[in-house]
Amino acid sequence: MLGKIIKHEFKATYKTALTMILSVLLVGGLVRMMDMVSFDGTIWRIIEMIMAVFYLLLLIAVPVSMFVVSIARFYRTMVKDEGYLTHTLPVKKTQLINGKLITSVIWIIISIMVIPLSLLINVKNSIYTFRDIAELLKLVFSNSTYIMDCVMFILLIIVSIMTSLLLCYASIGMGQMFNGHRLAGSVLFYFIFKYAFSFLQLFLMLIIPSVADMMNKYDTVNKILMAEDNGILALMLFVMPFQIILGIICYLIAYWRFSKKLNLE
């Protein structure tokens, strides 16, 4: 059943997602073509500058917009009028949440991956750029430390995206407590959760040095995590658990609200 939910979510979102993704590639190609055309004149340079600024803003806006569209769809299909149909389906609430979460994460990751691809279109010497990338990949895969850093960085991005989505899901679930002002309640709970977890993260960051000093007493742990070559890995190993715990808490809150305290508009 989870597979059917994911398939349905992709069918419902692919038009919007592909439009946003293709817009980045098309605008990037247009900017590249304008750069190849050598027209003199102040007006032409102004047009090129405007297009370049619009392109850079679009690169930033697409992943953000994809995130916002995913949250808007979750809100519309879970607590608005469509929610009556959604919650009558013979599926578990965990399957509904998981299906929407997986689909959203995939689309957001694709939108992020499109950014470097679009930037490559605008590189004048693309052949040399691809050669540089190939050399960089050879360097990365020749060192196990670099490989581990890259894997951990990718995992951290995925976990952070999932946690951000689940934070919004939990906020939407809690926002149902406000009869008549549920959207405002969802926004309010989002900021409450956001600042509460930020404060907790800051508190943990302050006590981590003390934990690190305690870990220095153990040679094995110290060699693995405190070595200079593993500095990035050590940082990620501290950040990753916090993100995972935060995501689990938000998931449980969302599940509790939508399974036990459902109150549709």
Image (tube, rainbow, N blue to C red):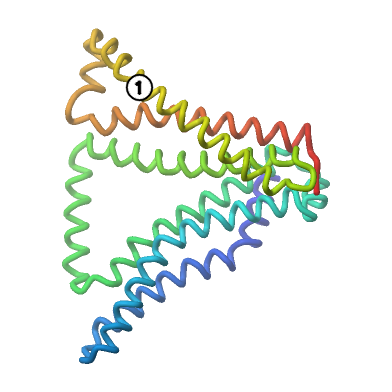
Q: Amino acid at mark 1?
A: Leu
Q: Residues within 10 Å of mark 1 (few under 14, many from 20)?
A: few
Image quarter where the N terminus lies is top right
| Quadrant of residue 43 within the rendered picture | bottom left
In terms of depth relative to the viewer, which is nearer, 96 or 83? 83
Viewer-proximal residue, 176 or 36? 176
User: In the rendering, at what x and y percent does residue 197 appear?
Assistant: 50, 31
Furthest toward the bottom, the residue is 40
Residue 58: horizontal and vertical position, in percent? 42, 67
**238 to the left or right of 20:** left
Image: 82 above or below 247: below
- Which residue corresponds to the image point at 29% horizontal and 10% vertical from the top-left? 214
The structure residue drawn at horizontal position 35% and vertical position 80%, both measured from the top left corner, is: 30
Residue 256 position, x and y percent, is: 71, 31
* Tag 1 residue: 206
Compared to 17, does 6 lie above or below?
A: above
Q: Relative to the observer, which residue lies in front, 206 or 260?
A: 206
* Up/down of 52 relative to 218, above or below: below
Instruction: Report the residue at 60% width, 51% height from top.
Output: 71
Q: Quadrant of residue 122?
A: bottom left
Classify residue 19 as left or right of residue 87. Answer: left
Using residue 83 as the reference point, say whether residue 164 is left or right of it: left
Total number of numbered discs in the rendering: 1
The residue at 18%/72% (across/down) is: 125
Q: Which secondary structure, mark 1?
A: helix
Which percent across, then down, holds residue 129? Answer: 20, 64
